[in-house]
Image (cartoon, rainbow, N blue to C red):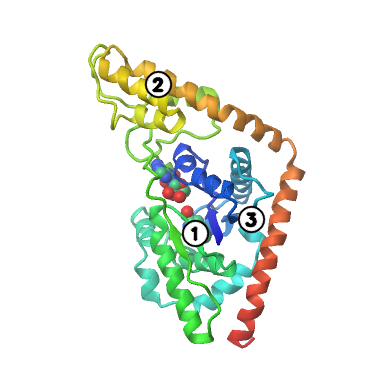
Amino acid sequence: MKILTGIQPSGKLHWGNYFGAMKSMFDLQAKGEQMYMFIANFHAMTTVREGATLREATRDVALDYLACGLDPAKTIVYRQSDVPEVQELAWYLSCLTPMGLLERCHSYKDKMAHGFEATHGLFAYPVLMAADILIMNADLVPVGKDQKQHLEVTRDLAQKFNNAYGEIFKLPDAYIPQSVATIPGTDGQKMSKSYHNTIGLFEDPKAIKKKVMGIVTDSTPMEAPKEPEGNSIYELYRLFATPEEVAKMAAAFRAGGYGYGMAKKALLEAYHRLFDPFRARREELARDPDALEDILRDGARKAREAASCTMEKVRVAVGL
Ligand code: ADP
Ligand code: TRP
């Protein structure tokens, strides 16, 4: 089973990204699955327009993943742009892609609704994503719910290609773990960089404290018993704490005399317990940019081997 996933370097990673996407990847890695994880810097160009920003964000995502548990000895990690063959495959797929298929994509319509400029890059985004997946012959693609349609487009394009040129591509499946909850942000709605309600994985500890202490709560007085389910602080605490600690907090809320301020402090402590070692590792990795570059180059070399193997067959099939 070959598993591949990509992440756009288009903003600082936050708690929602960790518990919603990164953690399930590390669990798969621990099971010994064959994994590819790449940083989708070509895709990020649809929204990031500054070279220095893109370069830094690409590096930051790599550092974040490595610090939190990505093991380059088990998972092949690379920058999308280090496998330029994906652009070539994207063109071949483009020539088979009906306009209507892309016009129906929610992500494009959503970007238009949010006032983004209607560029060809944004429109053709799903074709490049299909190329990322098909070039590596991935079986399974862990993604968030919002990417489900892009996986349908990928399967559709693989099928069209196979119908035209012969059986070259596998039809990959999306992997959307049902157990992954929607992580709430500081205002109670889904944590997302677009809503400005995120808590970054490696923000300055003072800023994290301020955000945690500022999580929006209702105004039930401290003495009153409270229902923990559905409360953002409790929902976030659940992610970090042990089952015994979670049960203890739930009981304290229900008994009354336990205020939101106390729960926020417990949450902050639980965050530090998990993330302080990751932060130390990140600082260590950041001190040696050459070592990071070596990891990414090594990943790219392995990824390119797989990509070249696919492209040799593809070029013959299309008549080049
Ligand atoms: P954002 O919403 O901040 O733009 P992305 O869309 O870039 O985040 O998400 C990257 C990955 O992180 C996706 O797999 C997505 O499902 C996951 N993710 C992001 N925010 C959350 C959240 N609040 N709860 C659960 N998963 C999330
Ligand atoms: N579109 C994905 C996202 O925004 C990122 C991505 C690009 C991707 N290419 C991919 C994910 C290939 C999985 C496989 O989250």
Marks 1/2 in contact by CB < 8 Å: the verdict is no
Q: Work out whether 42 lies above or below 57.
A: below
Closer to viewer: mark 1 or mark 2: 1
Name the secondary structure under disc 1: strand
Q: Work out whether 21 lies above or below 240.
A: below
Name the secondary structure under disc 2: helix
Q: What x and y, as percent, mark residue 293?
A: 73, 48
Give the residue at x 58% y 27%: 276
Q: In the rendered image, which quarter is residue 278 located in?
A: top right
Identify residue for label 3.
Answer: 79
Disc 3/disc 1 C-alpha distance (Å): 17 Å
Q: Residues within 10 Å of mark 1 (few under 14, many from 20)?
A: many
Amino acid residing under circle 1:
Val
Disc 1/disc 2 C-alpha distance (Å): 35 Å
Name the secondary structure under disc 3: strand
Identify residue for label 2.
Answer: 264
Q: What x and y, as percent, mark residue 20?
A: 44, 44
Q: What x and y, as percent, mark residue 148?
A: 40, 60
User: Mark 2 or mark 1, which is nearer the start of the sequence?
Assistant: 1
- Is ligand 2 less than 8 Å from the beta carbon at label 1? yes
Q: What x and y, as percent, mark residue 63?
A: 63, 41
Identify residue for label 1.
Answer: 141
Marks 2/3 in contact by CB < 8 Å: the verdict is no
